Amino acid sequence: MRKLFVLFLALSLVLGMMAPAVAEAPKYKIAILTGTTSQGEEEYRAAERLVNENPGMVLTDTYPDNFSSETETTIGKLLQFAEDPEVKAIIMVQAVQGATAAFTKIRETHPDILLIAGVAAEDPADIAGAADLVMGVDEINGGYQIVETASEWGADVLIHYSFARHLGYETIVARLNIMKEEAELAGIELVMRDAPDPTGDAGMTGAQTFILSDVPKVMEEYAGKKVAFFTTNCGMQEALQAAVLPQPNAYYPLPCCPSPFHGFPASLGLGVAPEDYGNIESYLEKMAAKLDEYGAVDRVSTWAVPVNMSMILGGFEYARDYIENGGEKLNKDKLVEALSKVAGADAAVSSYVDAEGNEVSNYYMILFDNVNFRDYLK
């Protein structure tokens, strides 16, 4: 009997110690929708990291690889998040087709849920009208950055790979127009080349195969000249990097979604360990060493900060602060604070201005400095 009493007492003490922890556990959830690892591994891993760091608080799912023709599936997944009464915020990066329709419906039925979109594929005015907060890569100033970097390298030609669907995006067109203007001022010939749409019949494999075969053709066409390459599509980055690396006169100024993890782990054969996502500088050193083997340290650049990952991690911090502390759904100062905190670097955040010069007050563009890999050579 005494043994039973002692066991009971011990169990009571353990439960008593656990009770405060249970009471303090957040009674809300934050849902995150990303692409799969084939469409955006960086976003997928960021969501995965948040699940591991915040057990029970984070819900995740992925939209289809062929998202442009399966919008109903994407919409359904977002609406399913909203049906969970504990979900107080939904973050979607990349906000592909279907985001506007789903967010509009959620706002009608669950106005309390904070809706955050990143890297929006739909019309800026539409997604900004549906979401509480939209974040995008500062493609406008990115256009200046791409041409400036190519010019510093002494590039004679700048190849711009894209396709009709992307050239229907307002932000991509705005960046392209800046690249045209800046390239002309820098004396660089900008050449637009059509690539297959990865969501088309040929799929991602067909698009990547095209890039791998076309880059050598371009280098032959412009033999003796320095040629910089850029593509607007995430899934093509790996192929473009792999095609540029062995060509001594080929240059790669920036990925479409600048990051050390955007295409490079596969193209450089480095892979990414879980600890790499938390130690960016160490990974940049590994990249620099590998680029040096290709003689490409001065031919490749990206941002030191993984921007899409920052949108998810920063969006999570922003949402958590809003849920726990209240305030306005839109607060630029808190967004800058959240992004800078997770990035470990100052984020330049500016409001999006459309083609007519109208400012979209809840659509923010994010810009970080790009990398000189020579600074990371040991």
Image (cartoon, rainbow, N blue to C red):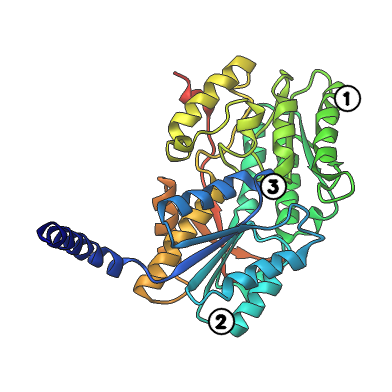
Please give the name of the residue rendered at 70% of the width and 38% of the height, measured from the top-left corner: 237
Q: Which mark is residue 39?
A: 3
Can you see residue 126?
no
Q: Which amino acid, by three-letter code, is at mark 2?
A: His
Asked which quadrant contains residue 282, the reply is top left
- In screen coordinates, is 377 left or right of 186? left
Please give the name of the residue rendered at 38% of the width and 67% of the height, measured from the top-left corner: 321
Q: Is there a contact, CB below 8 Å, between mark 2 and mark 3?
A: no
Can you see residue 220?
yes
Image coords of residue 112 (percent x, y): 50, 80
Q: Which mark is residue 221?
A: 1
Pointer 2 residue? 110
**Quarter of the rendering occupied by the C terminus:** top left
Image coords of residue 361 (percent x, y): 56, 71
Give the camera-side residue of 33 and 167: 33
Question: Is residue 77 shown above or below 314?
Answer: below
Image coords of residue 310 (percent x, y): 50, 51
Please give the name of the residue rendered at 43% of the width and 40% of the height, measured from the top-left corner: 278
Q: Which amino acid, by three-letter code, is at mark 1?
A: Glu
Number of the front mark, 3 or 1: 3
